[in-house]
Amino acid sequence: MGIKVKSLIICLLVYVFALAISILICSNIVLNQWVTVLIAHIIATVIVYIASLLFKNSSFYDPFWSIAPIPIVIYISFWPDSENLDYEKIFLFFIPVLYWGIRLTYNWARRWEGLYDEDFRYEDLKELKFASFIDFFGIHLYPTLQVNLSLLPLYYGLSVSTNTSSYWLYLASFYTIMAVTLELISDNQLWKFKKNKDNKNKFIKTGLWSYSRHPNYLGEILFWWGIFFMTLAVDTSYWYLFICPLSMNLMFALITCKMMDDRSLVKRDGYKDYMDKTNQLLIFPKKRL
């Protein structure tokens, strides 16, 4: 059994343990359903964080981003506060989330080399002062809270609202699926590019990447807006929840993309010219200087 396979099995066992413990603890908590979800989400995060410390690799947390939302959506779908099970609505919400979760987790699994392979962003952050504080709050807890906030519209659309499906929900569900497909195409183009040994230390500027420096992140952002749009399609009174996908949008645009660009500017020749001519996220024709 190779190192990568062993690493994936260890990661899976930790995640199953984290899920089991969070369910065990929260099963006896009588609170608002979403508060209970938040507590369970944080408990599971702490367990994954402890595993990250034990194995000295914060990339242990990476798949938590895409795995944790799946049991959350299952819970609020089949045990809703409204006690109203609408299988058509559940299907239209759940399929895009499941598609996103499986696709993103698979993309991480095929790239991750094992317990010795840690994301460069985590390594850079750990070089700063208060490394332990940043490791827990910045690398583990903050993403959990961000995902939890961005999932909040699902709670209102699936668990609270008793409104039924409509043409608009079908349209919003399809939009969300297309957002994930944009991620899929972008990541596959990047994967094929990196698999070519001739492209070592180079950056991709073909396909969707010729129009956007981060088309995969654009797909991710559009996915989170899709969750909001699906809830809005169910009940327009939840319009104020736009703050949830907006916060995710800002995180990617102001933090994640900047970190990726800053690294490429240092590591890859010609990236400055590419950066000047190519949009950060939106897929538009190249900018003319």
Image (tube, rainbow, N blue to C red):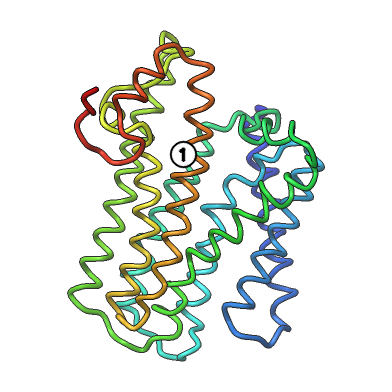
112 sits to left or right of 31? left
* Residue ID at (66%, 57%): 16
Q: Position of residue 182 (x, y in %)?
A: 30, 44
Q: Nearer the viewer, residue 79 or 65?
A: 65
Q: Quadrant of the N terminus?
A: top right
Above or below: residue 271 compared with residue 218: above
Most extreme residue toward the top is: 198
Quadrant location of residue 30? bottom right
Above or below: residue 41 compared with residue 5: below
Quadrant location of residue 99? bottom left
Q: How many numbered badges does the structure rendering display?
A: 1
Above or below: residue 170 compared with residue 277: below
Q: Quadrant of the C terminus?
A: top left
Q: Position of residue 203 (x, y in %)?
A: 41, 19
Element at badge 1? Answer: helix
- Residue flagged by tag 1: what amino acid is it? Asn
* Residue ID at (26%, 65%): 172
Q: Position of residue 9 (x, y in %)?
A: 66, 42
Q: Position of residue 122 (x, y in %)?
A: 66, 36
Crowd tier of the residue under label 1, counting other residues whose Cα lies within 10 Å: few below 14, some 14–19, many 20 or above? some
* Residue ID at (29%, 77%): 88
Q: Nearer the viewer, residue 61 or 202?
A: 202
> Residue at label 1?
107
